[in-house]
Image (cartoon, rainbow, N blue to C red):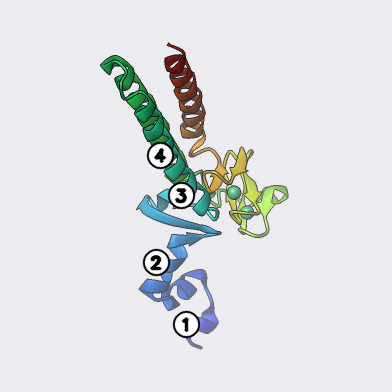
Amino acid sequence: MNDFENGSIEDENILLSQGEVKKLKRKKGNQYCFWFKNDEPLITIGPHWPFPLFLIVILIFGTYYIGFIFYKSEILFRIVQSCSGLFLILSFIITALQNQGINYQSINATFLDNWCQICQMNKLKGTIHCKDCNICIRGYDHHCIWIGKCVGEGNQFAFNVFILAFLVFFVINYVLLLI
Ligand SMILES: [Zn+2]
Ligand SMILES: [Zn+2]
């Protein structure tokens, strides 16, 4: 009887080449995963990646254009405008790149009512399988095409900061326009 017929999970893993393991690790559901720490990715790129790419161009040109409107303004206005624009762009980039909370751990297989058939993993409370990302997301909030993937446990804080940055940017610039 050879190793394959013995058929344990470890044996199947050994049969995969290094390249194949790397490929499996990199593509989880419909996400591309990068920069691993303890086997979990810090960065993921979602299935709707062209949308955040489009939005980042709009944000960069939008904030630059608003900066251009104020080119004659006082230096203090320009500093406030630039900082609020930078805050907006950075918070967006972090939200779009941060791992949204991909469910990796098969913690306990006894709660079969909370078992994802597609991921073949147990789900903790608040974990939902996203059809677009095709993977379970811990602390699922919603799938946002503008960041290209889900808002979940991993990027919820960054997403909230981004919404705040968006409001701050428009309020500050609207006030600056009125002055
Ligand atoms: Zn799932
Ligand atoms: Zn999703």
Q: Is residue 7 toward the left or the right of residue 82 in the image? A: right
Mark 1 is surrounded, within 10 Å at the Cα level, by few (under 14), some (14 to 19) or many (20 or more) other residues, namely: few
Q: CA distance from mark 3 to mark 2?
A: 26 Å
Mark number for residue 3? 1
Up-down relation of residue 168 to residue 100 (above or below): above
Is the residue marked 3 within 8 Å of ligand 2, measured from its CB?
no
Q: Residue at x 51, y 88 (%)?
A: 1
Q: CA distance from mark 1 to mark 2?
A: 22 Å
Q: Nearer the viewer, mark 3 or mark 4?
A: 4
Write down the residue under mark 2: 22
> Label 3 amino acid?
Leu
114, 138: nearer the viewer:
138
87, 44: nearer the viewer:
87
Q: CA distance from mark 2 to mark 4?
A: 37 Å
Mark number for residue 62? none
Q: Is residue 59 toward the left or the right of residue 129 in the image? A: left
Q: Callout 2: helix, strand or loop? A: helix
> Label 1 amino acid?
Asp
Lower sequence index among marks 1 and 2: 1
Mark 4 is surrounded, within 10 Å at the Cα level, by few (under 14), some (14 to 19) or many (20 or more) other residues, namely: few
- Farthest-out residue, bottom: 1
Lower sequence index among marks 2 and 4: 2
Write down the residue under mark 3: 53
Lower sequence index among marks 3 and 2: 2
Mark 2 and mark 4 in contact? Answer it, CB < 8 Å. no
Q: CA distance from mark 4 to mark 1?
A: 59 Å
- Farthest-out residue, right: 113
Mark 3 and mark 2 in contact? Answer it, CB < 8 Å. no
Image coordinates for residue 89, horizontal then vertical, percent: 40, 35
Mark 4 and mark 1 in contact? Answer it, CB < 8 Å. no
Write down the residue under mark 4: 61
Image coordinates for residue 120, horizontal then vertical, percent: 62, 59
